[in-house]
Amino acid sequence: PESVPRRHDVRLPPDTTRDAFDKAITALRKDLGVEHVVLNDKPLVDGWYLEHPNTHDAFHVVDQEDLVCSAMAYPATTAEVQTIVRWANTYAIPIYPISMGRNVGYGGTAPRVPGSVVIDLGKRMNRILNIDGENASCVVEPGVSYFALYEEIQRRSLPLWIDCPDLGGGSVLGNAVDRGVGYTPMGDHFANHCGMEIVLPNGELLRTGMGALPGKDGADNPTWQSFQPAYGPYSDGIFSQSNFGIVCQMGFWLMRETGHQAYMITFPRDEDFPQIVEAIRPLAQNRILGNIPQLRHVAQELNVTGLPKSHWYAGTAPIPRDVIRKHASQLPCGDCSWVFYGTQYGDITSIKSQLDIIQDAFSKIEGAKFFLPKDLPDDHYIHSRALVCSGVPVLRELDWLNWVPNCAHLFFSPITPTRAADAQIVHDINVRLHKKYSFDLFPTLCVAGREMHYITNILYDRSNDDEKRRAAALMRELIATCAKEGYGEYRTHILFADQVAGTYNWNNNALMRFNETIKDALDPNGILAPGRNGIWPKKYRGKGWQI
Ligand code: ADP
């Protein structure tokens, strides 16, 4: 989409005059260099995935100019991050740290409080600080993307894999801080991190885990990337999905290279869903399913061809089930309802015996069909899945964005137990409400032994105000309806953070009161990402910020 002239002048931080703001910016420029503090006063450009803006949410759900920062700052070192934090305290200006800002579908780079200064860490802090081939681990700064880490490992010819999410352009550190997932056996990114270096909201520097114990003669601790909890309370968790600190370095475990075999299984009927879930659970709990496989509704087989909705259906209403069926019957998956993408790992004999068990379990569902990549055409989506599931970053998933003109998307991401009765409730709510608000339903279940991330991708035309309103209304009703049944989201777009946080309200909001206690202790001036994940510092509470 083209840029349009700005309707408003620079969006100032709350309770800040232009004069005070200019003075503060001048001071910050003195510290960082004039070119490293840039005002957000040019026309907004949505760009695209690889050239994404850090000025606003490119996938705006509200007016494009609503969720904007006042300026962007580019620190080069941890010391400069500390300088910025102290500056923010002095001038009472909210700051919003991002790593690379490819947080697509969850708010992009937009701060929750308009007029905050975005701290774009990734632009200049993008070093791979260490890759330890023996320990199979690495330490990265915020600006290291999956592509960059992957390429460096290839360059050094190390027998190691990374774990990437569907799109490889994001920050390894940023995604883990936001508790994103990938698809190899090490797909839980936060669970596979080891050690953090964090600037606290008062400017103090903290190392977690074994990093708190100084190495010999000032070296990093030799077990910093080997042992996660170290001694005392395990504090790392409170720095994920929060606004308690700015993570400037983070360690990750890498996977040792191994054999792998991707496959696809199709199931004929929509009603097979509960049986599929019941078949998955023992396989996953026994770790026969070694990674995080995906179960997708067949509607997505149309979508991942990269062809627009208009190619399949002339109307704007959701594509009717029989039309999906008709088209699917012409595709390699055939006329089916659910498609399971899995990958097995190990040597050839081991993979073969795993596949025998899996085929045996799923073939109890009548009409299940099993495919290997060699059975499918070269341009089929399975080849891209096979790469992601063996730690090779890709961009194929951008094909989603061809679906409607000016396509943007929102993720609705509740967690359900890996149990048919629960998953069916969440699925039925999605079917009913997507129909009510007139959106195509694209559910993907990322499955593990005890829970599934049930993720629906709500695709909308961001030039169409009515679609934006309906997409937001759909999100709100999905969140509320699932919460009534006891299901909650693992992550959400910044606009819905308050609502989602509000559903985790057991015992008179004990969890939020606990979070607020930590927030107020660490950030008494309330400068760091106010409102992120629904956590508001004292200064903002009770003033109508919650939405
Ligand atoms: P990615 O580049 O993987 O998409 P982002 O940089 O957009 O990730 O990070 C996602 C969200 O996580 C950000 O909006 C921000 O709130 C939070 N975040 C990212 N990096 C950091 C960091 N280094 N310190 C604190 N919070 C961070």
Image (spheres, grey):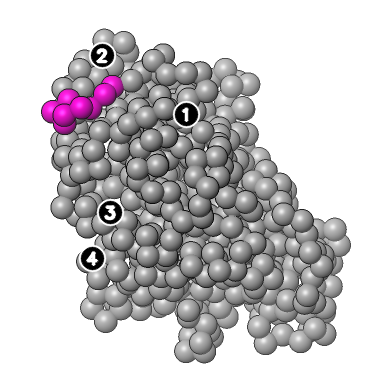
Amino acid on which the number 2 mark rests in the picture = Lys
Q: Which residue is mark 1?
A: 381
**Closer to the camera, 513 or 44?**
44
Q: Residue 193 location, x and y as percent?
A: 43, 44
In the displayed image of the protein, which residue is found farthest to the top?
349
Q: Which residue is mark 2?
A: 352
Magenta highlight range: 363-370
Q: Which secondary structure class fits the magenta region best?
A: loop
**Closer to the camera, 93 or 482?**
482
Which residue is at 60% across, 68% downward? 465
Where is 497 relative to 315, above or below? below
Q: Which residue is mark 4?
A: 486
**Closer to the camera, 375 or 539?**
375
In this picture, residue 74 sits left or right of residue 432 = right
In this picture, residue 85 sits left or right of residue 447 = right
Q: CA distance from mark 4 to mark 2?
A: 39 Å
In this picture, residue 317 sits left or right of residue 287 = right
Res 427 label = 3
Where is 283 relative to 101, above or below? above
